[in-house]
Image (cartoon, helix red, strand yellow):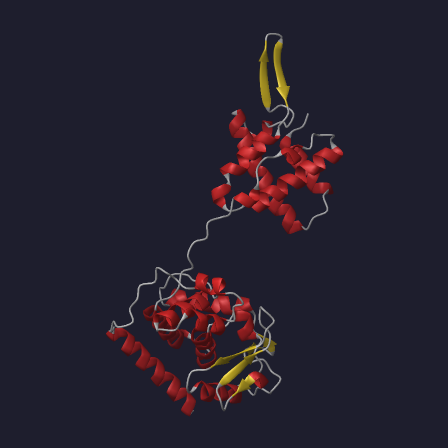
Amino acid sequence: MSNFLLKIDEYNKVINLADSTKKTYTKALYSFSEFLAKKLSCSIEEVDLRKIHVIRMKSGDIFTPINSSLLDEFLHENVEKGNLAILCSALKSFFKYLYKNENFPDIVSNMKFDMKKYKKEKKPTRILSRHEILRLFHNIVSHSENLVRDVLLFSLLFSTGMRISELLNIKIKDIDFESEMISLTKTKTRAARIVSLRNGFGIVIKHYISVNNLSETDYLFTEGGDKFTPGKVRSMLKKYLEAAKLPFVKVHSIRHSFATHMLDAGSNVFMIQQLLGHEYISSTKIYIDPNYTRNKNIVINEQKVVYRALSTKIGALLKE
């Protein structure tokens, strides 16, 4: 008797994997058992690994075990779901266990399915239009409990295109207030680069530093004495997007927004490559949304109202 669910339980008891990995693999194996049950027209509790194929003979039915062709069929059915890597890893681990402990044929080695041929189709990154960015900042002004910090944080992301990791690693000593530039020393490519700030940003940052009593060695963005985490920024962005009734976008999509808007404003792709800190131009081209609706010369009165309200609010805070 090789009841599939029973074998999964036995596998989980002896396999040396992290609990989270066990949970993920178990889910994948249960999905496979449901596939087999559907093929056999039975419940998943009745699936037996050694009685998958039935050969009808005059002398009676002959049952044969599961084979690699069924693994191939299962994986092909799941190509569109984008979880092939997990399914393959789970099946390989499980059948390796059966081969070692149950003398079960190593069917995974005979699979014809080549995962490298199947890549999940990437959807274009959703970016925020200029109007949506203004709506976002308008809601930061309306809902923030730490306005200067939050406006400064998201303004730096939107106006420089730096990565969230680069932003959160900025220390006060990295900022040149006179030239209004920031040295990024901890980058993804490990190559230091300098980003320019918008005119007047130095004053805002100085005010922020003064209010928060930050020293030269402190990180620019801290909470309770600790450096901000990417998770904190993600939750902040989610909160403000919901308040503005804007579609969900990831923090990293801000870099895509920056690149697209820079191109729209007339910058060439090589300049954008330098600003983003990309090693290869091909990486930069991925960041530029070809489907973005250009609105460079369109005047939207609501944008003017939002921008004036934002400028007035920040200006008042700086005078305090």
Could you tell me which residue is drawn at 57 percent across and 13 percent down?
A: 56
Rendered residue at 70%/34% (across/down): 98
Query: Which of the two residues, 268 or 262, is positioned nearer the viewer here?
Result: 268
Closest to the observer, 151 or 78: 78
Instruction: Determine whether, in the image, residue 313 is placed left or right of residue 117.
Output: left
| Image quadrant in which the C terminus is located | bottom left
Front one among 73 and 287: 287
Q: Position of residue 230 (x, y in %)?
A: 54, 68
Percent from the top left, x then y, of residue 227?
59, 75
**Given the current orientation, which residue lies at the most extreme top position?**
58
For the N terminus, the quadrant is top right
Residue at horizontal 42%, vertical 82%? 198
Seen in the picture, residue 27 relative to 194 is either above or below; the reply is above
Q: Is residue 84 visible?
A: no
Q: Is residue 151 visible?
A: yes
Horizontally, residue 145 falls left or right of residue 297, namely right
